[in-house]
Image: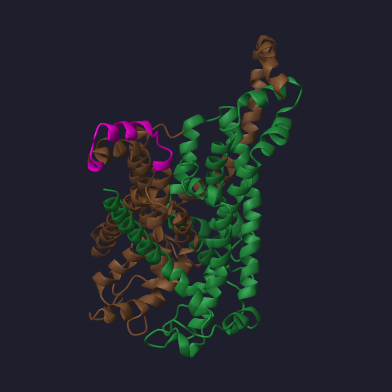
Amino acid sequence: MPKKKSIKSIVHSAIIIVALAFFVFPIYWLFVTALKIQVDIFAMPPKWIFTPTLQNFYHVFFESAIPQLTMNSLITALSNVGISLVIGTMAAYGITRYKIGGQKLLFWFLSIRMLPPIVATIPLFIISASLGLIDTRIILPVLYLIINIPFVVWMMKSFIDEIPESIEESARIDGCSHWGVLGRIVLPLTAPGLVATGVICFIFAWNEFILAMVFTRSAHTRTLPVGISAFITEEMILWGYITASASIAAIPPLILAWIFQRYMVRGLTFGAVK
Amino acid sequence: MNTSVEQSPVKLETLEVDGHKRRPRRIKFGLILVAPAILVILLTIIYPTIYMFFVSFFRWSIIPTLPRHFIGFDQYLTIFRSSAFYGSLQATFLFLLVVVVVELLLGLGLALLIASSRIRWLRISFLMPAVIAPVVVGLIWRFMFSHDLGVINYFISMMGLERIAWLGRPTAALISIMIVDIWQWTPFAMLIILAGIESLPTEPLEAAQVDGASSTQVFRHILFPLLTPVLSIVLLFRALDAFKTFDIIYMITRGGPGRATYLLSYNIWRRAFFENNMGYAAALSVIMIILATILAKFFIGLLSRTQKMV
């Protein structure tokens, strides 16, 4: 009996490892290709053992527009995260504690998240064109509010729900103002949640593609995903440079997700699964 | 802190005496908190969406100086008469159905395996596909799908099979896109279901095992009913996100070959920003919004039937 059980668990483990290999291999292949020289990239059969080189990264860092696009992505994402957190957390607090709008308002925010972004791009494009906002540095941080405010509302609601309301009540009784309760009680108590929420907002903004592609034109506004998508041409020869750039786009979310793994499932489900 | 909490019931009573005075102020503060978020959403998405209905009745070029012609419902009529639209619709829903079902089943199966396994610590590696930009995912898969130099065809030929023209044939291209989506989002489904399994009470499962229930019985009568809330969350997110798939199509097939992978989002983008026909794209978007609303209503309804989410 115990022997049978151990065989079963070995089979289970084997299946899990095969699945894991399937889900990790493309990411491995991306990084490995970025570390190969041109000849090794196109070697058939593929070279599993090779001498890694940083020359692709060197080229991308010093001889291409990628550093600037990376900066654009960073600035866009960070400024959007700041505004999203302030506006979204305020709304979450108002809905949770002051009972404004209730369930209806929450699901209204959720339905905004469910809207296909392409649907918004056409009217937004016409409006921003007439306001002269296409290809400016402020358009993307503003547009990403559509994605991130509903997310912050739901996430922060789930964190605020976890603080006992009695703490806030007693602070009120002790003479703390409404803003004071929010700033001195609620925010410090939800600080880890606030940081995690911000990190996930950052990943969304960092990865966003369709709005960035439609609303930016030049190298001083384009973000990293748009730059990478431009590599897809009829004949893609420079795979080393392409994969090196894609690696630069992939590394920050991977690191952040690793650090904040405790909150990721919660984040990917809008705070619904803890 | 402890003492103030203990004191609070006493003081609360005094608070309630003049509670009616405080109430308007309380509501006012609450409104101040919520107002900016509502305002931003109204301005950035609700108003533009209404504006889009307006645009959909015009022949509208992307170039602002060109004249616009009011043509009423003409564009809707053209859409409903065009076989390209039905092709796009069919591809979109076929894609949605296949990826959501596969991701849910695979995710559930893997979650059940990992939940009872000793290598649970490996689970966090499954997070990786879901956090990488779809653009990057599309790029790397396009590289791997390459006919002569791709690593996938290398594996296939190593097994003695014929190389596959992944992106060269209509059906194969649609399947390729499905594989990429399944690759990126099955781990997401798995992690959520796993979190659901781990938050379950252990008593019913133990009781069932003591009573000698088989593992299939345990799954069907205990685990599955308890997991339906989590499964419907996965369904809601995956169905709506699969419905709007754009990035990987743009990166891998560009809608091709022919129109085989013209999913709705890609179709709209192409009409608006490639064929310079904003009015037509707006009409398509109106249809897409209506479909998305029906989908969202359905899955949110499913969700609220299975649990109290909030």
| Percent of width and height locating residue B88 | 29, 62
Q: Measuring 46% from the left and 40% from the top, which residue is drawn there?
A: A272
Residue found at x 45% / y 74%: A29
Q: Quadrant of residue A156?
A: top right
Of residue A46 and residue A119, the one placed in the foreground of this image is A46
| Towards the viewer: A232 or A59 | A59
Quarter of the rendering containing residue B244? bottom left
Q: How many numbered marks have been drawn onto this rendered protein structure?
A: 0
Q: Which chain is green?
A: A
The residue that appears at 33% across and 46% down in the rendered structure is: B295
The answer to whether any part of residue B217 appears in the image is yes
Q: Is residue A136 visible?
A: no
Q: B99 above or below B151?
A: above
Q: Is residue B212 magenta?
A: yes
Residue A213 lies within the magenta run: no
Q: Is A82 positioned to the left or the right of A243 in the image?
A: right
Residue stretch in magenta: B197-216
Q: Is residue A122 above or below residue A153?
A: below
Side of A86 where A99 appears, left or right? left
Say above or below: A216 vs B74. Answer: below
Left or right: residue B74 compared with residue A272: left
Quarter of the N terminus of chain B within the rendering = top right
